[in-house]
Amino acid sequence: MIFQSYTFKMSDIKRVAENTIRGLLKRFPCVAVVGARQTGKTTLIKNLLPKTPFYDMERQADFQRAKDDPDFFLSSIQTPAVIDEAQKLPELFNALRVAIDQDRRPGRFLISGSSSPDLLKGITESLAGRVALFELCGFSTEEMWGLKPSPFYEMIGEKRFGDLPGLRPRLDLKRVLEACVSGTYPEPFLKRRDPEYVRLWMENYFDAYVKRDIRDIFPGLNIALYRTFLQMLALASGETFNASSFARSLDVSQPTVKSYWRIAEGTFLWRGLPSYAKNATKRVSHMPRGHWRDSGLLNHLLRVRTPEDLRAHPQVGRIWEGFVIEELLKGFRNRAISCDAFYYQTHNQAEIDLILEGDFGLLPVEIKWGFKTDPRRLLSLRRFVEERGAPLGLCVNNAESVEWLAPKILQIPAAYL
């Protein structure tokens, strides 16, 4: 097997989140960049602060120095300072609290961490009010292809809904589908022209996640059962989560299945979407729903290797739905536009794939795989907009133009995001 040569490096890709993190460093004494492994956190941090002292808790010398006396370590280093893989040393968080309380100048510490609920717990419990938390996901499609940042998210955030129909094409469908198939982890995307490399990378990533990360974080967990649970979860991506069905298949209790769900969510592998039930005028489902956060890893588990495989797969609609939801959420998060995400389903089976709620109000979003969407298939979306007084509803599909499909229902091709 001959691997192709690639000269395009991860550091060459401009991350939209850079300006947001710079803004946080100007306001908070500590900024924590968290996220799954291999999303480019270390590269981003080094690009942001290339001359800043850098301490890596996966490097034995740095780890031992900090572990021996965390308080002395923090008092003796020059700030601003970067501490990478901070989840390796949980006792560091209490020491950070003390150091920050002694000197609250902004931008003193930039820390990062991966795949660890303990990291988030340490930040929220020890550093509450002292730290700004930023989650870095994989590449967005605009980052992948070096596009200028899309104006779509600012238009929504600033309530400039009337400007949305003026959006212009940014990307062709072929590239969007490539992104959906390869996923958004930087390494497999950059080497997507070598499918065998991507397959091996995904295989090793998944094995390392289960055999190293999960075993280290949850030493008492049945690793074999948890791995089987993840493989089953791939088939349930985009669907309502039925814990009892999983429990029967795995021959475990429902609480065990729910703990597996929480682990997958807490380690950035899975996104759970709660039901939107605020001011409900109809009976709504309260069962959780979710999807795999990286479409590439999901496609790997489903053996989807090419855009042709994707088009032919029976779960193409669910795979596509999760990819678009993540793209939307990344777009808002990277620009520090705060919003919460839900799904909506009534007992009469009226469904909406995504409900976003922020300072801009309510934004219901239906996601379709096809090139053309019949407005009659958007009845739930139209009724939600009317009943909740939402400024508009979006239908994200693979059409070629932005256009009104019905009053207050706007079609946005995924390539325009």
Image (cartoon, helix red, strand yellow):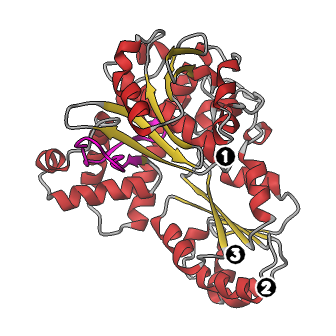
The image quarter containing residue 347 is: top left
Q: Residue at x 46, y 65 (%)?
A: 117
Type of the residue with mark 3: Ala
> Dot 1, crowdedness within 10 Å: few (<14), some or many (≥20)?
many
Instruction: Using the image as rendered, state which of residue 298 and residue 162 is in the foreground.
Output: 162
Secondary structure at badge 1 equals helix
Give the distance between the C-alpha atoms of the residues marked 2 and 3, in whole angstroms: 26 Å
Give above or below for 311 relative to 3: above
Instruction: Using the image as rendered, state which of residue 44 and residue 32 is in the foreground.
Output: 32
Give the distance between the C-alpha atoms of the residues marked 1 and 3, in whole angstroms: 33 Å
Q: Nearer the viewer, mark 1 or mark 3?
A: 1
Q: Residue at x 66, y 76 (%)?
A: 130
Type of the residue with mark 1: Asn
Q: Residue at x 76, y 29 (%)?
A: 146
Q: Is residue 276 magenta?
A: yes
- Reading the image, the residue beneath label 1 is 334
Q: Is residue 9 magenta?
A: no
- Reading the image, the residue beneath label 2 is 103
Q: Position of residue 9 (x, y in %)?
A: 75, 37
Q: Which residues are magenta?
A: 271-297
Type of the residue with mark 2: Asp
In this view of the protein, can residue 138 be seen by the observer? no
In this view of the protein, can residue 61 be seen by the observer? yes
Q: Position of residue 251 (x, y in %)?
A: 11, 52
Secondary structure at badge 2 equals loop
| Left or right: 9 in relation to 221 | right
Q: Nearer the viewer, mark 2 or mark 3?
A: 2
Question: Dots 1 and 2: beta carbons under 8 Å?
Answer: no
> Dot 2, crowdedness within 10 Å: few (<14), some or many (≥20)?
few
The image quarter containing residue 53 is: bottom right
- Reading the image, the residue beneath label 3 is 61
